[in-house]
Image (cartoon, helix red, strand yellow):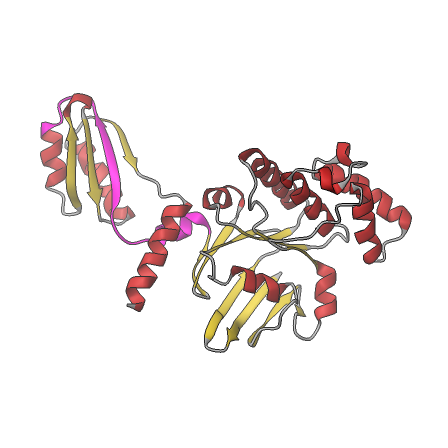
């Protein structure tokens, strides 16, 4: 559905994007993760045909952003991180204005407005002035505006920026509804755990480079380094402590005798981890739980970017 092919964008000696190559499948929610200046907004601006790449190209459903920009614009809906609203218009007037800009007939616009306000949970605000809406409501109204021409692809740059927790949950639920409708969604955010909840795949951008891409499990599997394991025992920890210390991959064992608990760092891969558990059972180490600390999306981002920094230095 979306293909970035060796996309570069440079401003003098600054590389905002450096050879971005990426394919996003139809019906996918793809999240772009990165610090400020990583290249997320630049990638979205090129995808939205707002700025041309220095080199390379992007294709949306086979249409080039360079050579077929008008055709691409008919396929996409773009919601920037900063957007304007016309405060003196009522909600329905605001959407009607944008529907007219897309040359939709008046009767079609009326039907669209009803459906979109229901989708973004603003039906009861139809006759209210835009200026009276909360920030979260304005974000949802802007999303409705983005959907007026029924685009196949949504480009959402920091859609949850500045929202309170309730408003973020509402936005997340709406995005899930859009996925069920078959939309392909590109979304960027600094709220990393929320991306993990709604995205099928993520891409980590750092200094214009795509340094990791895939689903959360795939990216976590690529991570090197130690993981932490906690073992809850049925009886005394003494024998178990010595047993785990004898394993080549185990280090930094911490014992909490009162709770019959062991915690240790483990540097082996998944096969070694499985073997450790199997051997412990054979050795009659009576465990109630054997838990591996799961890295969330923030952990993934920090580890990957730290590895890149170490490599570059």
Between residue 303 and residue 90, name the one nearer to us.
90
Picture layout, residue 280 above or below residue 95? above
Magenta stretch, residue numbers: 215-238
Q: Does the magenta stretch include residue 233?
A: yes
| Residue located 26% across and 52% down the image | 225
Quarter of image, res 250: top left
- Quarter of the image with the N terminus in it: bottom right
| Residue located 50% across and 67% down the image | 21
Between residue 277 and residue 148, name the one nearer to us.
148
| Residue located 28% across and 63% down the image | 310
Residue 97 point in image, percent of width and height: 82, 51
Q: Is residue 225 magenta?
A: yes
Residue 100 point in image, percent of width and height: 84, 54
Between residue 162 and residue 68, name the one nearer to us.
162
| Residue located 28% across and 68% down the image | 313
Q: In this view, does 304 lie to the left or right of 271?
A: right
Residue 80 point in image, percent of width and height: 63, 55
Q: Is residue 72 left or right of residue 166?
A: right
Residue 15 point in image, percent of width and height: 47, 72
Q: Is residue 276 left or right of residue 10?
A: left
Between residue 152 and residue 42, name the one nearer to us.
42
Picture layout, residue 234 above or below residue 306? above
């Amino acid at each position: 559905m979306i293909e970035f092919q060796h996309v570069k964008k440079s401003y003098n000696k600054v590389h905002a994007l450096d050879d971005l190559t990426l394919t996003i499948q139809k019906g996918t929610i793809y999240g772009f993760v990165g610090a400020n200046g990583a290249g997320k907004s630049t990638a979205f601006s090129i995808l939205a045909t707002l700025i041309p790449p220095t080199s390379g190209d992007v294709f949306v459903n086979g249409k080039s952003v360079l050579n077929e920009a008008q055709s691409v614009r008919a396929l996409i809906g773009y919601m920037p991180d900063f957007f304007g609203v016309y405060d003196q218009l009522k909600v329905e007037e605001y959407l009607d204005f944008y529907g007219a800009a897309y040359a939709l007939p008046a009767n079609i616009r009326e039907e669209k407005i009803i459906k979109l306000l229901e989708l973004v949970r603003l039906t009861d605000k139809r006759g209210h002035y835009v200026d009276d809406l909360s920030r979260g409501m304005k974000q949802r109204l802007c999303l409705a505006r983005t959907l007026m021409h029924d685009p196949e692809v949504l480009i959402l740059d920091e859609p949850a920026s500045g929202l309170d927790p309730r408003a973020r949950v509402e936005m997340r639920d709406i995005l899930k509804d859009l996925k069920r409708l078959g939309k392909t969604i590109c979304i960027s955010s600094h709220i990393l755990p929320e991306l993990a909840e709604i995205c099928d795949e993520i891409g980590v951008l750092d200094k214009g480079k795509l340094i990791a891409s895939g689903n959360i499990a795939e990216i976590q599997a690529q991570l090197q380094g130690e993981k932490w394991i906690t073992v809850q025992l049925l009886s005394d920890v003494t024998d178990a402590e010595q047993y785990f210390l004898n394993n080549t991959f185990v280090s930094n064992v911490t014992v909490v005798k009162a709770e019959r608990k062991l915690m240790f760092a483990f540097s082996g891969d998944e096969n070694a981890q499985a073997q450790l558990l199997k051997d412990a059972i054979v050795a009659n180490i009576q465990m109630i739980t054997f838990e591996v600390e799961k890295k969330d999306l923030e952990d993934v981002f920090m580890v990957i970017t730290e590895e890149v920094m170490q490599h570059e230095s």
